[in-house]
Structure formats: C-alpha cells, structure tokens
Image (cartoon, grey):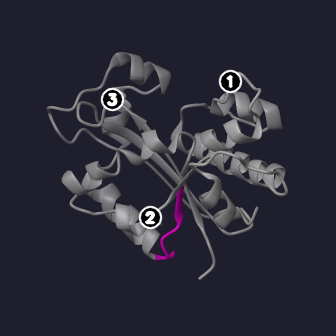
Amino acid sequence: MERTYAVVDFETGGFKPEENAITEIGLVVYDKNFNEIDSYQSYITPYDDNLTYSQEALDITDLSMEKIIDEGKTIKEVASDLELLLKKYKRPLFVAHNAQFDYQWLPHFKQYGKKELKNKFDQNTMCTLVLSRLAFPNKNKHTLGAMCEEFEIELDNAHSALFDVRATGELLAKLVTKMRGTVVTDEVTIEQVKKDFKL
C-alpha cells in the first residue's frame, strides 16, 4: 500500500498530558500526492476528574466547557472512531506542527479510551515545525500562523483542530515541494526526510 499521511492536531486543556485533558482532535488523511482522502473531528467530553482545563487554554481555542460537553463525544467513542478510520490505511505517518507535543497525547486513548492507537501509525513521525526550520533557517518565527503567511495558506479559525490540520497538510505539501532538491543538513531528521520525501 502506498504511503499515506495522517495530519493530527490536538486542542487541550493545558500543556501537560499528566495534568490536562484533550478537548478536541482533528485528523486528516492524505495520499502520497497530498490529496485529502479522509477526515475526522470531535470534541472530547471530560474523562477524568483529576485532569484539568485551564481558562487560558480554553480562551486560546475559543471553547467553553458547555460546548465541549454539549457537542463532544466520550473518549471511548472517539478512540473507537479513530481505530476504525485508521484501520483503512496501512499505518499512516503521523504528522503535526510540533509533532512532539501532539504525539504525547496518544496514550490518553489507551488509558481512558481503552484503545492503543500508537500502533495504528507508522513508527516514525514527521514534524512540519522541524521542516519549516530546515527550509527557512533564517526566519525568526516558525509557528503555524507564520508559515501559513509565508506560503499564503488560508488559516481561518486558528486553534480549531480541523482548520489547523488542513492548514498543516497544505504546509506539508508546500515544504516538501520547496525542499526537494535541497540539501538537508539536520542530522536528526535528514534520513527520515530523505526516506519519506525522496530528497
């Protein structure tokens, strides 16, 4: 089966998986040519009384607890939805803008949703934040917003998971196009970048 990419974005109640809860997930699957072939979005209702939601985080994502509870699904429902979706593809590559941050939330689905989703993805991850820094070493800001501005990518409703995911997917395609034929020198990522994007 050809390579597919699962671009993921978690909105959360804070920055620490051991202290905060997931509020929303957005996921879009792309084929090897970066055409969208599947998508998923859901708010996630509270699932552990010990996990908190900071008001600052809710304000950034323009969410309220009322909206999350009224429109969300349980984490078990979301975990089952994601398992069914990801089964259709042969371990897509997990992609995010700051993949290290987003990837660390996956264990919540095993602990609270009773589904192990890590093994539904490729063992490697791809980070458009890292790629942005490689492609634009002299640029001061590499946030999703800054990179969307650089490439004139539309980013409405920033910090809304599905909008962020689609912007990240478009950014990934733009970065790959830019970096093909470019010498990549970052020793941590060079082999994986070469492998996945045939640089």
Viewer-nearest of discs 1 and 3: 1
- Pointer 1 or 3: first along the chain: 3
Disc 2 + disc 3, Cβ < 8 Å:
no
Given the image, on which type of amino acid does mark 2 rest?
A: Gln
Q: Residue at x 36, y 61 (%)?
A: 118
| Numbered range of the magenta stretch | 88-94
- Pointer 2 or 1: first along the chain: 2
Given the image, on which type of amino acid does mark 3 rest?
A: Glu
| Place of residue 158 in the rendered image (x, y in percent of width and height, measured from the top left) | 60, 31
Q: Which residue is mark 2?
A: 123
Any mark on residue 141, and which? 1
> Is residue 95 in the magenta section?
no
Cα separation between marks 1 and 3:
34 Å
Q: Residue at x 70, y 41 (%)?
A: 134
Instruction: Tell me where residue 121 sits by quadrant.
Output: bottom left
- Pointer 2 or 3: first along the chain: 3
> Is residue 90 in the magenta section?
yes
Query: Which residue is situated farthest in the bottom direction here?
Result: 1
Cα separation between marks 2 and 1:
29 Å
| Place of residue 49 in the rendered image (x, y in percent of width and height, measured from the top left) | 14, 33
Dot 3: within a 10 Å radius of its alpha carbon, few (fewer than 14), some, or many (20 or more) residues? few
Give left or right: position of 103 versus 35.
Answer: left
| Place of residue 163 in the rendered image (x, y in percent of width and height, measured from the top left) | 61, 41
Q: Residue at x 50, y 76 (%)?
A: 90
- Looking at the rendered image, the quarter that the N terminus falls into is bottom right
